[in-house]
Image (tube, helix red, strand yellow):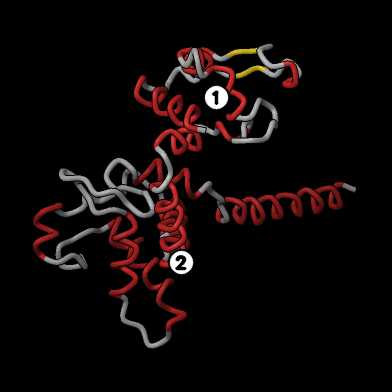
Amino acid sequence: MFLKTFKVCLLFAIAFIVFGCQEKKEQHFDQKKLIEQKCSKCHNLDLPPETFENEIAPPMMAVAFHVKSFMHVNDESLRIPKAMEFVREYVMHPSREKSLCDKASLDSYGLMPSQKKSVSEAELKSIAEYMFEHYTQKNLNEAQVIKNRLNAMPKGERIALKNNCMTCHRIDKHIVGPSLKKIAKRYRQSPALIIKSIQNGSSKKWKDSHNAVMPAFKELTKEELESIKEWILSL
């Protein structure tokens, strides 16, 4: 009986060690959140990226495109794995000799400091995966189309979209809240009330909204509120 119990315990112990190690080895991360936490202090993560006069590191899109294009491979299926391996090695052990930057860029940005104390091997692997899956020509083209469409919109409409106003409102259709055309019609003679409702929130002002509460958007600037108001009135 003792021997049987011992064997069962031993099997459980072995299973715990094997599967426990496997679970630790196969860590899963929220890759977008991880790259924001570990990389956004120096690198612009936007797609397409904005450019800044005093940026301290190249945009992450530029890094991904540059590294991928510099990988010398005979088989295209090996390009991304090789690029990922380069990133994982370089981030931990950077040097001017390993750098793929031209001399002028390297002098301008400076050599990247080693991130040994800031990121684990597992985290870095996940970041590299995200880099080459997210920063692609296809995603850039799609993002550029969206950006161009947004840039063509009135400023107030862009701000409304950015702050999820269109989740509850439509231009000419009632959803949770009244249509924006109805709002424009009611408050055309008292436009300051539009700003007041956006900034402070409101409730019970529209019978067909069934007591839905409009949340307050206190983080919006005076200029943003004016832009939204003018756009609504233009409808």
Query: Residue 110, position in %: x, y?
Result: 13, 52
Can you tell which mark lies on residue 138?
2
Foreground of the two, 93 or 200: 200
Q: How crowded is mark 2: few (under 14 residues within 10 Å), some or many (20 or more)?
A: few
- Residue at image point 44% right, 38% down: 158
- Residue at image point 47% right, 48% down: 32
Label total for image: 2
Query: Residue 177, position in %: x, y?
Result: 66, 25
- Is residue 183 left or right of 101 when viewed as pictured? right
Q: What element carries label 1?
A: helix
Q: Is mark 2 on a helix, strand or loop?
A: helix
Q: Which amino acid does label 1 sit on?
A: Ala
Query: Residue 94, position in %: x, y?
Result: 22, 58
- Is residue 63 left or right of 101 when viewed as pictured? right
Foreground of the two, 7 or 167: 167
Tell me if residue 126 can be seen: yes
Does 122 appear above or below 215?
Answer: below
Which residue is under mark 1?
184
Foreground of the two, 1 or 42: 42
Q: How crowded is mark 1: few (under 14 residues within 10 Å), some or many (20 or more)?
A: many
- Residue at image point 15% right, 67% down: 97
Foreground of the two, 194 or 165: 194
Query: Residue 105, position in %: x, y?
Result: 14, 59
Nearer-N-terminus badge (1/2): 2
Q: Which of marks 1 and 2 is in front?
A: 1
Does 119 appear above or below 223?
Answer: below
Q: Which amino acid does label 2 sit on?
A: Lys
- Is residue 128 left or right of 4 when viewed as pictured? left
